[in-house]
Image (cartoon, rainbow, N blue to C red):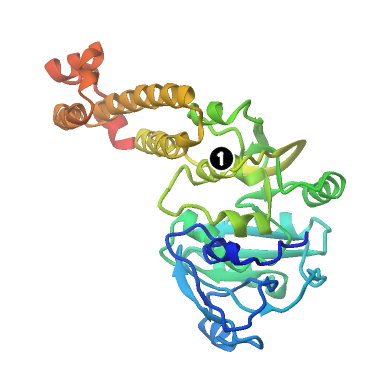
Amino acid sequence: MPRKLLKKQDLQSISRPWGGSQGVRVELPRGCPWDCRPVPCWSADASVRESLASINSIGVKIEPIRTFGVTVTFGRYEKAPFETPNMSAPRFTVISTAHNRGFHIERTICSVLDQGFNDTQYIVVDRGSDDGTNQVAAIYGDKLTLIGAPGANHTQTINRGLAVAEGEFVIVVDDLLMPGALHEAERVITTHGVDWIVGQCTRINEDDFATDRIDALDPPSFGAMLMHDSPSLPLFGTFLRRSLIQSTGLFDDRLSHAYGYEYWCRLMSRGLRPRIIGPTIGGYREGEAPGAHSLVAHGLEMIEVARRYGRFLPLRQQVELWRNCDRRQRIYALAEAELAPVTARRKLVQQIVRRPWWIMHDHVRQTLVNGVTHPLPDDQRDAA
């Protein structure tokens, strides 16, 4: 897809391509034409960055910066009135993240390599496994790119893969890519020319048998998306055009649970909607059931995201969303009290100082007066 030609008024948006708090500083010499087109280059490798000239043939100075845990270097600004398609770029980039998944990683790799779609870049990002995951991935040599990201959280690991992605479309697959998924995506892209595709997913067990379906549902409205705790767009069934990621930014690595939900809200706040397709794209392996602490943390992150994007709604819907988030947060505050009955009153008092209207609700008053009357048993609380 042709990129918009660089105009003078576009310099600010070009200099913040990832949506972070910082961007790149671009210094244009005298006489530099404003019809230059940007050709982004990414690298986290210092030797590659150093090989990129800071001053190119038309004298544009590029200073790399560090953002979201990876170094983003915007290279060549070529004097060209028209966009020349990059015929060497692959159609798809598949990113898999791994951490101590030595028993399953080969199944994931084979599900990608067995797609029979040659025009694919495959990246595996390992978060510092010590169970042989790296050795298994290394068996496949030049069929994939193995990147180490020790100490990174899941969101940062995905961003590390996105930083070196070269494909026109990107998908994150941590467990299984279902047979024919890339061919189906290619058919939809060719037919409809879309930038954002979401397919169905399925839950799988340890033996890769399907146990449940994860439906991809198009939210009826952006407001409805912000008012629900359950995300309706599975990450592992989502294809995103890389140019869309460049203009929208990376995943928010401050979030540990709701980073996918935040990204969908970010896209929808810009007027974009996904193309929902029927075939199953990804398989999500069931692990241990998430503990209560994890569920509460996930819900609170989703409330944080909803409040962040509420400003894009009409005023009446903003009021409705405020009430919705306040009610959900009060429920999670009571749930946290059940998980920590010893400190329940103190934590509720801290919440009520910020939200004094909560004292009007019976459950809050009862917890303040009587403490937690039905705390979780010790063994369940420890498991949570």
Could you say where residue 27 lies in the image, as x and y percent from the top left? 52, 79
Residue at 36%, 21% in the rendered image: 327
Which residue bears the numbered disc 1?
269
Residue nearer the viewer, 347 or 146: 347
Compared with 331, 35 (above or below) is below
Could you say where residue 19 lies in the image, as x and y percent from the top left? 50, 57
Residue at 19%, 18% in the rendered image: 367
Q: Quadrant of the C terminus?
A: top left
Dividing the picture into quadrants, the one containing residue 370 is top left
Residue at 49%, 76% in the rendered image: 64
Question: Hey, what amino acid is under mark 1?
Answer: Ser
Compared with 114, 139 (above or below) is below
Secondary structure of the residue carrying tag 1 is helix
Residue ranking furthest to the top: 362
Compared with 131, 196 (above or below) is above
Residue nearer the viewer, 185 or 78: 78
Residue nearer the viewer, 316 or 129: 316
Dividing the picture into quadrants, the one containing residue 293 is top left
Could you say where residue 46 lies in the image, as x and y percent from the top left? 51, 83
Residue nearer the viewer, 306 or 133: 306
Residue ranking furthest to the front: 31
Could you say where residue 220 lies in the image, as x and y percent from the top left? 63, 25
Residue at 25%, 13% in the rendered image: 361
Q: Quadrant of the N terminus?
A: bottom right
